[in-house]
Amino acid sequence: MTDSVIEDVKLAVDEACANVIKHAYRGDTRQKIVVKFKLRKKGFEVIIEDSGIKARPELIAGRDLEEVRPGGLGIHFIKRTFDVFQFDEKKTKGNRLRLIRYLGGGNEDRNLGQ
Amino acid sequence: MKIEILDSKGLKVMSVTGDIDMYSSPDLRKELMQLVRKKVSPLLVDFRGVSYIDSSGIATFVEGLKNMMTYGGKLRLIGIPEKIMEIFCFAKLDRVFEIYGTFDDACNN
């Protein structure tokens, strides 16, 4: 991955962990977040696990980017970097978020500024 | 993150260095809102030393701008590093904020 992509991944994982603290742990920074990563043939995978309040994926949406107000950008920053954003429904307690960025296929230099 | 409030050519400049993230954003918000409460305008924010910004940092500036707009205040961002500018563009905030390359450009507008 290029340095630019690495910076995007850093921001996206940071935003995902911030969401865990804010929503799953209701602001309690003492709780544990487990971040794992795997480099596979198809892409780079990050798994973020917590034992907090269950997320409701159907309610997770960023704000309309045309609307100017504080908040609601974090989810956009995650989804612009990762091709897959998926909660593992099999996890009974807490959450397991799987993020995958596909490598190759010409998307390495996708212009995120457009 | 470090914040300095400077007076330059009669203008208030908030110089921010380091990472703006969910831990440092509350400090940034406190400093920014103090200036907003005083109805400072224009307020120049020097981004040249900012190494990282997340959505909480962006939200802080959006909140500051919206508050300043209530009294016709101007918030001008200076010297945003390329990678951070990319984030502003992605969020379509380059159309919302007044963004300048240099201090002189911001002063002359």
Image (tube, coloured by chain):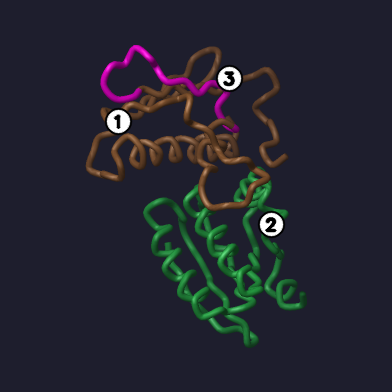
Quadrant assignment for the C terminus of chain A: top right
Circle 3 is placed at which residue position?
Answer: A102
Q: Do the residues labelled 1 and 2 touch (CB within 8 Å)?
A: no
Q: Residue at x 51, y 66 (%)?
A: B16
Answer whether labels 1 and 3 touch (C-beta < 8 Å): no
x and y, in percent, of residue A27 in the image? 30, 45
The N terminus of chain A sits in image quarter: top right
Furthest residue toward bottom: B10
Mark 2, residue position: B96
Question: Which class describes the residues within 10 Å of circle 1: few (<14), some (14-19), or many (20+)?
Answer: some
Q: Dot 1 corresponds to which residue? A: A53
Name the amino acid, label 3. Tyr
Colour representing chain B:
green
User: At 39% across and 64% down in the image, what residue appears?
Assistant: B27
Q: Colour of chain A?
A: brown
Position of residue B2 relative to residue A26, above or below, is below
**In the depicted structure, whether residue B24 falls above or below residue A42:** below
Please check whether the numbered discs 1 and 2 fall on a single chain.
Answer: no
- In the orientation shown, which residue stands out farthest toward the left? A30
- Amino acid type, mark 1: Ile
Circle 2 marks a residue in which chain? B
Q: Give the residues in magenta.
A: A80-95
Q: Which of B105 and A17 is in front in this view?
A: A17
Crowdedness near tag 2: few (<14), some (14–19) or many (≥20) residues, C-alpha within 10 Å? few
- Cα separation, mark 1 vs mark 3, equals 29 Å
Residue A10: image location, x then y, percent: 48, 38
Image quadrant assignment for residue B29: bottom left
Looking at the image, is A64 positioned above or below residue B101?
Answer: above
